[in-house]
Amino acid sequence: MHLLGSCLSLLLTLRYFTNWVRQPCNPIEVYLNNQPDLFNSKPPFAIWCMALSIKLLGFNEFAVRLPSAIFACCTGLLLLVFVKKETYNSWLGLGSALVLFTSTGYVGWHVARTADTDAILAFWVTLYAIMGYLVIKSNYSDKNKIWWFFVALTLACLTKGIAGLIGLPAIVGWWMFKTDKLQLFKTATFYYGILLFLTFVGGYYALRSYYTTGYAHAVWTNELGGRLNWQKELNPEQTSLDFYIKAYINQQEFLIWFYWFLVGVIYLMYTFWKRQRFGHYFIWVWLVMVTLLSFSATKFEWYDAPLFPIMAIALVLAINQLTQAIHPQFAKAVFLLFTLSGLFLFGKITKQNIANTGNGVLNKFMQRVRIEKGINHHIVFINKEASFNLFFYMKKDKLEGYSNAQSLVHHQIAPNTLVAVTNDKDEYELASAYQLQLLTQLNDCKLFKVVRGRKN
């Protein structure tokens, strides 16, 4: 009866929400240039967070980047609290957070410092990975831990779709390995959690498919089957299986920590059958996650963002266990060196981040045009492809009282029109059709005045 009542309540809520979104623009659909966006098929939890931030702080770079920064900080705090509580050692908790915040692949571009989904996804994946361990520790009897596991799993999928499931195969596999796993299937909360996940995640995809024609096909192309196959438009060149391992080493995404991590992995694998501690669990989760990412044909540097918190936990636990096995005093000396290295790297990275504000060339170019040069006329931006940075700064330009529009090169452009380009390709096509006068430029961003109409 409780299960039936919960189902009816969720269905009534869903129906109310469906009626509420029956309007030209609704929070279920994701829009690009006032049209439903099929290129971005991910659910909009991250966009909801950014929209709320913009409502509170205005339309600016800080507002759209703030949610990523908040979730990134919360992930570090989560590591600190969890490791401290499980090991009864505050320094180990601090060490895990330091490792995370000194990993350039995590605190850099497209994750913690930019308005993207990956820092938010990393938080939810880390949370449900931790809850997956705590569910086992409680012998599958702690209902609150089971609830939090499914809440985090649901919000991970509402943040980045199928990518939110990246840690699930490893956790389910570990659960199945435990001899007392049947206790989980005897717990009603487990089935309530599944219902919660299917209602909100399945309900979202069903609603968006209802409102957006072609959305189901876009999900298959962009999220499900598409990512497993090579997508030339995303990856011009096919990538190797060791793509992410090379990024840790060659691009120093995990800095010196990766070598410590390898030592820890080898040690934990050696001691796996002797004593199973929770360090082994996080090594297992990382191994499965990095394997799934590696076998996906479409790869990007930021796809491994959820792996960094898992690696930070596993690294600290593994090195601590290894050094304790050698000698307790040796463990203290190693961890002191470990902490000093982390503080040095944290200070260095923080200094670099302060020096590099992250504001792109386009933002500085618009400031030069509108403020330094005092050009208030209507500007036509020549751009053939979806450029989210350009759309953002065009919107910001309009909100500041200026006029602009986007156009393709082959459209008829009248003499004396101001046109802007952001890449060499668009500039070449524009110059081949019109006689132009350069007004100002910043790197590849250039502002021209059309002197004559289309050439014969």
Image (cartoon, rainbow, N blue to C red):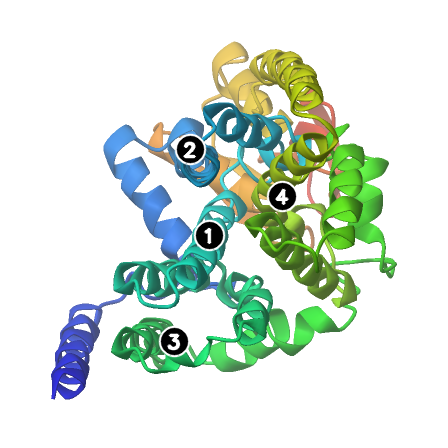
Q: Earlier in the sequence, mark 2 or mark 3?
A: 2
State the separation of the CA atoms marked 4 and 1: 12 Å
Residue 43 seen in this snapshot: no
- Of the two numbered discs 2 and 4 in the rendering, the one whose residue sits closer to the viewer: 4
Residue 318 pos. (x, y %) = 67, 40
- Label 4 sits on residue: 314
State the separation of the CA atoms marked 2 and 3: 29 Å
- Of the two numbered discs 2 and 3 in the rendering, the one whose residue sits closer to the viewer: 3
- Label 3 sits on residue: 184
Give the residue type at disc 3: Leu
Seen from the viewer's position, the closer of residues 159 and 222 is: 159
Residue 257 pos. (x, y %) = 73, 31
State the separation of the CA atoms marked 3 and 1: 17 Å
State the separation of the CA atoms marked 2 and 4: 16 Å
Give the residue type at disc 1: Ile
Horizontally, residue 357 falls left or right of residue 323, namely: left
- Label 2 sits on residue: 77
Residue 131 pos. (x, y %) = 41, 56
Query: Residue at the location (80% across, 64% down)?
Result: 232
Q: Which mark is residue 439?
A: none
